[in-house]
Amino acid sequence: MYKIYTKEGDLGFTSLSNMFKKISKTEFIFDVLGTFDELEVSLGFLHSARLDDVRKVAKEVQKDLFSLGSVISSNERISKESVEKWENRIKELEEVIDYFNNKNDPLESFILPGGCRESSFLHLSRVTCRKLERMVFQYLKKDKNKLFIGKYLNRLSDLLFVMARYSNKKLGFKDIIWNNKES
């Protein structure tokens, strides 16, 4: 029987899938990879979304995030073809952003996160995505060849925002308008 525990990390060291040497679990790469995982998990809540299009996009994005996490953890130089593939994927994300945004009412004020369950999970995913984006750009200061990962995350956070608004609208919830006069 396969055992899930290896006891290899009991002393605070582990290795990435493409490395043979052990590195400390306190290295920043594990914060980055852990935040990729957090974002994938928060999107997993949308597997039970009541909207087919939201559920489908969430699953596609989870797959992208898993792939991007493996790219960022790799010490290998990324090929030109792979960069082009991801640039095309970013363009596809922009089309999906436009699809959802065109179904929303115009945004005339800041809104507070909330509303239906789907919207709340999308907002949670959005703030996790923004955190991950900041971490990725910090991590990639030395590796400009992988900056498309940050670009993808930037578009993804926009997508999650418009999907949150769309979910509220489709499921009969109004945006919660922030009014600074009430503070």
Image (spheres, helix red, strand yellow):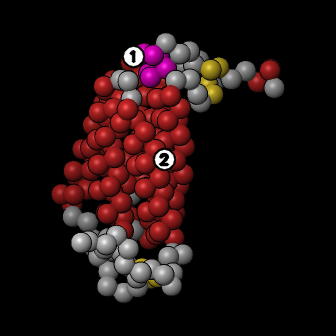
In percent of width and height, residue 160 lies at 44, 35
Q: In the image, what residue occupies the spot 48% across and 47% down?
A: 129
Q: CA distance from mark 2 to mark 1?
A: 23 Å
In percent of width and height, residue 148 lies at 35, 54
The disc, 2 or 1, on the residue closer to the chain's N-terminal end is 1
Magenta span: 166-171
Magenta span contains residue 18: no
Q: Amino acid at mark 1?
A: Lys
Q: In the image, what residue occupies the spot 46% across and 29% down?
A: 118
Compared to 72, does 12 lie above or below?
below
Compared to 51, does 45 lie above or below?
below
The quarter of the image holding the N terminus is bottom left
- Other-residue count near label 2 (Cα within 10 Å), few / some / many at <14 / 14–19 / ≥20: many
Dot 2: element: helix
In percent of width and height, residue 18 lies at 29, 76
Give the residue furthest to the left: 81
In the foreground, 147 or 19:
19
Q: In the image, what residue occupies the spot 73% across and 21% down?
A: 179
Q: Amino acid at mark 2?
A: Cys
In percent of width and height, residue 126 lies at 50, 40
- Cβ atoms at labels 2 and 1 below 8 Å apart: no
* Viewer can see residue 125: yes
In the foreground, 180 or 30:
30
In the foreground, 4 or 46:
4
Checking the image for residue 129, the label placed there is: 2
- Other-residue count near label 1 (Cα within 10 Å), few / some / many at <14 / 14–19 / ≥20: some
Say which residue label 1 marks.
Answer: 103
Prevailing secondary structure class for the magenta stretch in the rendered image: helix
The quarter of the image holding the C terminus is top right
